[in-house]
Amino acid sequence: MQFSRKLLLLTSVLVFAPLVGISALQTNGQSRPNVFFDCNGRNCNDQYYRTEIDWVNWVRDREVADVHLIMTSLRTGAGGYEYRLDFLGHGLQDGYDDTHLFQTLSTDTDREQLDQIAHMLGIGLALFANTAGYRGLVTLTGPNPESAGQGQRLVSRDEVDDPWNLWSFRINGSANLDGESTRSNTRINGSASASRVTPTWKISLYGTINHNRLDIELEEDDVLDTRTDFSVNPLVVYSIAPHWSVGFEGRMGRSTRSNQVLRAEMTPAVEFSVFPYDEATRRSFIFYYKIGPQHSRYFETTLLGEDSETRFEQSLQIQFSQRQTWGDASVRILGSHYLHDFDRNNISMSGDIDFRIVRGFSVNASANIAWVDDQIYLSAKGTTDEEALLRLRQRATDFDYGFQLGFSIQFGSIFNNVVNNRFRRGRGR
């Protein structure tokens, strides 16, 4: 319905635009609007959109743009994606705000997805161009009556008899072999998932299995490590209010690196979203709490003398993220501890920011730090030098951290819309 209204509006403005007196000052003396493309998620293929939509100026600097186009995406229950396109006016067009939502199918090819995105980008940009006073940039044509029925559209579950009852399944597998005269590595990986998503319920089941064999010849002793790990992760969520959700998440698996023959947990959880959930691609502020039992059986006796144990654990996670015209940022704080011993805890913080300071200059940074005192699964035997060097087993630690800082400077022409795909050689440009 929203798409139909906007298509009708687009038809009206393109047909009657010559009859409406729009100030030439709105266009800033340009024949085409400047568009800054800001994408986070799937199909951020700016070259494709530059090629398909050649009636605007695609600029590299937000400060000279007439419209800031932000594209984000979320996974749908059927395995496709819902895209959100926000068109935000800038400069003389400050105050313009338009949003388009549309979905792709899980069975769509990459080309079909790109074509759909380019189509919606074109509609949104045409609406902006007409509102801002740019004339004669595009023409509107309807479908060919002789080819009716060839297009696709998304339908609601009330319109079809779905034999799968909204369930979606996926199976993946891969095998890899690499090596040289003194080393060989064989990896076999597989995964499977099943999910069903409605406005009220979200149900998913995801499982993986990984087999890894590493053989290294050294001067004194050879290293041969063979391990098979797996995990199964169920999740059930129920929407009880516009900002509240309840459910549980589970985990059952085997991890050689964590000294666990079996780990099983089933944890009730509750989540509160400060902002409406439908704004998640642009801004999100979430409190997530869970508490429940965790049962573990170990390959080797742990530092605390346990071969198996069942412990209760609780955790609270606070996460904030947003994507605005100045850039994007996110912060995550997580705290957890075992109920039998509050000193067995884990506190971590992480964040990242990409901030445009002035025209053509932006800085980005990311950092994480964790204070670790909950490694109750560590083996009493410790790790060998080979296991430590190859990171085959976890070692005891009090903390871990990471930090990254970078910057970006852009200068030169910002109005070159030409796309030249010669001699790409896998560079993507």
Image (tube, rainbow, N blue to C red):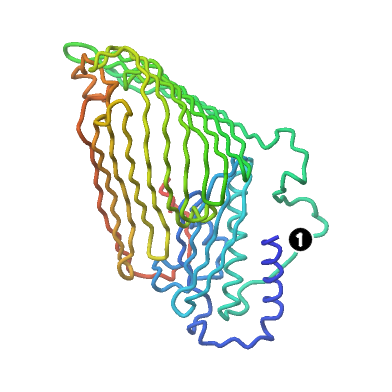
Q: Which quadrant does the N terminus fall into?
A: bottom right
Point out the residue furthest to the right here: 146
Q: Is residue 127 left or right of residue 177?
A: right
Against 331, residue 123 (above or below) is: below
Against 62, residue 255 (above or below) is: above
Against 181, residue 359 (above or below) is: below
Residue at which label 1 appears: 143
- For label 1, the crowd category at 10 Å Cα-Cα, with few meaning under 14, some 14 to 19 and many 20 or more, is few
Q: Position of residue 191 (x, y in %)?
A: 51, 27
Which of these two is toward me, 231 or 421? 231
Which of these two is toward me, 342 or 381? 342
Kind of element beneath mark 1: loop
Q: Position of residue 366 (x, y in %)?
A: 29, 50
Q: Residue at x 33, y 67 (%)?
A: 360
Which of these two is toward me, 64 or 8? 8
Occupied quadrant, residue 316? top left
Q: Residue at x 27, y 44 (%)?
A: 368
Q: Position of residue 382 (x, y in %)?
A: 21, 17
Q: Residue at x 33, y 29 (%)?
A: 339
Point out the residue furthest to the left here: 220
Which of these two is toward me, 308 or 423? 308
Q: Which quadrant does the C terminus fall into?
A: bottom left
Against 113, residue 416 (above or below) is: below
Q: Is residue 379 left or right of residue 327?
A: left
Occupied quadrant, residue 343? top left
